[in-house]
Amino acid sequence: NAGVTQTPKFQVLKTGQSMTLQCAQDMNHNSMYWYRQDPGMGLRLIYYSASEGTTDKGEVPNGYNVSRLNKREFSLRLESAAPSQTSVYFCASSDSGGYNEQFFGPGTRLTVL
Amino acid sequence: KQEVTQIPAALSVPEGENLVLNCSFTDSAIYNLQWFRQDPGKGLTSLLLIQSSQREQTSGRLNASLDKSSGRSTLYIAASQPGDSATYLCAVPARSGTYKYIFGTGTRLKVLA
């Protein structure tokens, strides 16, 4: 099992460019999450998907959109990147919401110039 | 609003020492608490998940305890090794029944050979 995979691993964008971060899990989990991690701020939830077909905002959703493509895949899109979105982005999944362990991907390190 | 604090932010110990990492949370109405390990430049690895009905959980040299009434959890690492050097984070649900998790900013542990 690969667990949670993310692509790309690194990305550099210019202000105003768009991109999509991809996430997939092979654990048949219902719930998936996108977090960002910034120095001194810890991990903050951007969006989550409790189950296939549903998505909801987390703590810091502004400037992002998500798509739960199917049970395995959950993508995060930056429509017009800003320097404030420079961060490390993590995708996670769990079997059903907050009652079970969350498993994390390796992360995408994004720099917006 | 749930807040999670981990003190100290950094800790250095000699190899072989037993140590305790602390995690405090403000809202005791949680249904679980999860401890993670993060190596530099990597994703988070789940170490232990404690359900609200449990007082402690063990995995190898790791033992995590949970005291909801005092809003505290501790992660005990026995006979520390240089390979234990990493950042340790705890996470709790923002409130009961939610998919949103609040993370502490972590304790950066260095075990000296």
Image: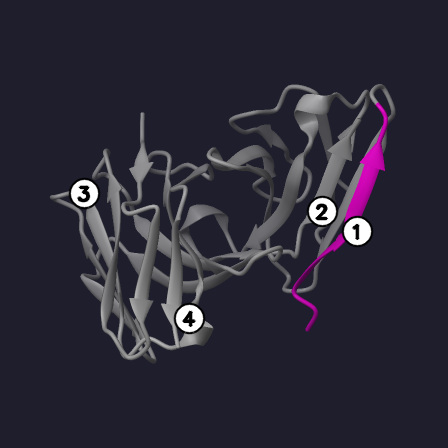
Percent x, y for residue A17? 87, 24
Vertical position of residue A62 compared to residue B102: above or below: above
Q: CA distance from mark 1 to mark 4?
A: 28 Å
User: Which chain is mark 4 on?
Assistant: B
Where is mark 3, residue-wise?
B71
Q: Amino acid at mark 3?
A: Gly
Percent x, y for residue B101? 43, 40
Asked if marks 3 and 2 fall on the same chain, the answer is no
Q: CA distance from mark 3 to mark 1?
A: 37 Å
Element at label 4: helix
Where is mark 4, residue-wise?
B84
Give the residues in magenta. A1-14
Where is mark 2, residue-wise?
A108
Element at label 2: strand
Element at label 3: loop
Select label 1 or label 4 by which is in front. Answer: 4
Which scheme is used to colour this image of the protein?
one colour
Q: Quadrant of residue B49?
A: bottom left
Q: Amino acid at mark 1?
A: Thr
- Residue at 37% x, 41% y is B93
Q: Amino acid at mark 2?
A: Thr
Residue A26 placement, left or right of B87: right
Where is mark 1, residue-wise?
A7
Select label 1 or label 2 by which is in front. Answer: 2
User: Which chain is mark 1 on?
Assistant: A
Q: Amino acid at mark 4?
A: Asp
